[in-house]
Image: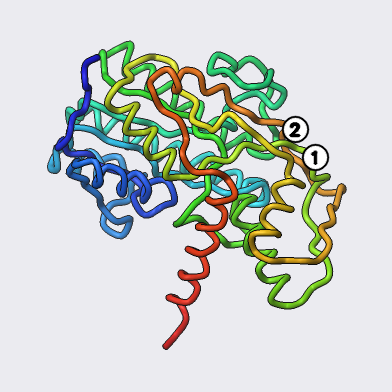
Amino acid sequence: MEDLLPPPARVFVAGHRGLVGSAVVRRLSADGYEVLTRPRTELDLRDAAATEAHLRESRPDALVLAAARVGGIMANSTHPVQFLEDNLRIQLSVIAGAHAAGVRRLLFLGSSCIYPKLAPQPIREDALLTGPLEPTNEPYALAKITGITQVRSYRRQYGASYICAMPTNLYGPGDNFDLETSHVLPALIRRFHEARRDAREEVVLWGTGTPRREFLHVDDLAAACVVLLRGYDGDEPVNVGCGEDLTIRELAETVGEVVGYGGRIAFDASKPDGTPRKLLDVSRLAGLGWKPSVPLRDGIATTYEWWLGSQKASMPA
């Protein structure tokens, strides 16, 4: 099979300081690629003219679009305008700018929330646009669906070698641990850590604890991105997940054990659960020879260690 992006190709990573982008940078560098980045203070990816000008000047061979406004249920519910508009602006700017600058390969990273709330499980890529979305993150999901449509349109109209990947719930070093804006796993790590530190007898979590979720270590996603850049050139998005899920209650119990919290775990059923189940069918990616390598419990432990280290590093001397 033809290698579509052999090293040492030059790859621009948009969003290189985020959870996903930083992992992609680590993996590309380890695999011998020349990685190009630009900090947000120097390039606002929502600025189409500036983004196109930078890409014309730097002339990368490929681009990974990992930049996005992301967050959990609370953040999505509180700031729907920003989750819709910021993501649309970033995607329109970067994808159009890449084409105008002659970037020959592009990987757009979406999210599993693009799929209908009640999609058949495990979710195949062709479930896209077959039913209503989960209301709590609909603006973000619609932005990501628009990104997929944009990529497909550039493929069909211009023959661009642009592709899409749809990751499941991600975690790992570099994650956001802010309780107001984080996703469920880092939020659980922080809440149980603080409960243990403060000797609290109980931690109350949102929802019923019954929804099932799939979690993938971000380093596994980065490895999948390289596989796709080198070996996939299809119209359809590609799911990226581990193919297994667990309930939020089971996840909470695992995080509590890893962190060393021995108190009670309770659930507030008056708060929203979100989608009841969201397990991805990853057979398309598996057919390219990829499989995950980081077990969930091990990944939670190393993520907790990373967060503790980052806390110490940010404390004043």
Residue at x 72%, y 36% (from the top left corner) = 212
The vertical placement of 97 against 1, above or below, is below
Residue closest to the eye, 170 or 283: 283
Q: Amino acid at mark 1?
A: Thr
Q: Is residue 190 left or right of residue 126?
A: right
The vertical placement of 26 against 152, above or below, is below
**Residue on which the image places disc 2:** 276
Dot 1: what SS?
Answer: loop
Residue with the most extreme bottom position: 317
**Residue on which the image places disc 1:** 210
Q: Give neighbour class at mark 2: few <14, some 14-19, many 20+ (Cα, 10 Å).
A: some
Residue at x 69%, y 32% (from the top left corner) = 134
Residue at x 25%, y 50% (from the top left corner) = 37
Residue closest to the eye, 65 or 278: 278
Q: Is residue 103 left or right of residue 317?
A: left
Q: Position of residue 32 (x, y in %)?
A: 19, 42
Choose top left, top right, bottom left or bottom right for residue 123: top right
